[in-house]
């Protein structure tokens, strides 16, 4: 326990930029115990999964799913996966559009090559979405 206290004091001191940190050993021990209790509480895990085109196709073919095309409207108009909703990741208001979706429902997402959808999926996970499935390689790898 003394080692944790020592490292806790070092960590607190190193995180203070120009502000002076005055923390007693008892406060550090209390903070460590609180963090340990919080970590032991069960939490629902979030998952960002990247899958190949066949797996993606099979999953979205099974029924009513949330399917997002994160490309620009111009890209979308040039071809898209049937049933997808175009929410342009580059438009700057992507998160305000997806915020209305059910965060407990699996969301399927793709873009042109997989880079934008990976960034979008990570933002969604950070915002509390539980499961986001991303098309590996994006629409460029979509043979269907």
Image: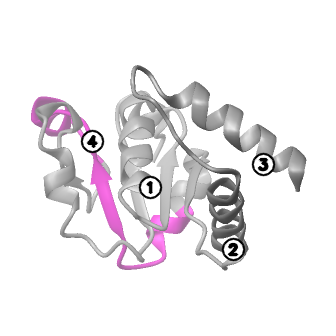
Q: Earlier in the sequence, mark 1 or mark 3?
A: 3
State the residue in front, 57 or 93: 93
Nearer to us of marks 4 and 1 is 1
Q: Residue at x 27, y 42 (%)?
A: 70
Mark 1–mark 2 Cα distance, whole angstroms, equals: 24 Å
List the residue tagged with mark 3. 5
Mark 4–mark 3 Cα distance, whole angstroms, equals: 47 Å
List the residue tagged with mark 2. 37
List the residue tagged with mark 4. 70
Residue 41 place in picture, x, y as percent: 66, 78
Q: From the viewer's perspective, is 67 left or right of 129?
A: left
Instruction: Tell me the SS state at disc 3.
Output: helix
Q: Earlier in the sequence, mark 4 or mark 3?
A: 3
The N terminus, quarter of image? bottom right
What is the number of callouts on the image? 4
**Where are the magenta residues, as a range?**
58-80
Asked which quadrant contains residue 103, the reply is bottom left
């Amino acid at each position: 326990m003394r080692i944790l206290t020592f490292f806790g004091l070092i960590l607190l001191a190193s995180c203070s930029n120009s502000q002076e940190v005055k923390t007693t050993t008892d406060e550090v021990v209390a903070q460590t115990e609180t963090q340990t209790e919080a970590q032991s509480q069960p939490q629902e895990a979030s998952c960002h999964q990247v899958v190949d085109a066949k797996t993606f196709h099979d999953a979205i073919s099974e029924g009513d799913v949330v399917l997002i095309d994160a490309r620009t409207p111009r890209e979308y108009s040039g071809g898209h996966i049937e049933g997808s909703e175009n929410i342009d990741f580059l438009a700057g208001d992507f998160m305000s559009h997806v915020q209305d979706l059910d965060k407990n429902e699996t969301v399927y997402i793709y873009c042109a090559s997989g880079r934008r959808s990976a960034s979008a999926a990570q933002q969604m996970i950070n915002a509390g979405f539980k499961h986001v499935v991303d098309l590996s390689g994006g629409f460029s790898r979509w043979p269907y």
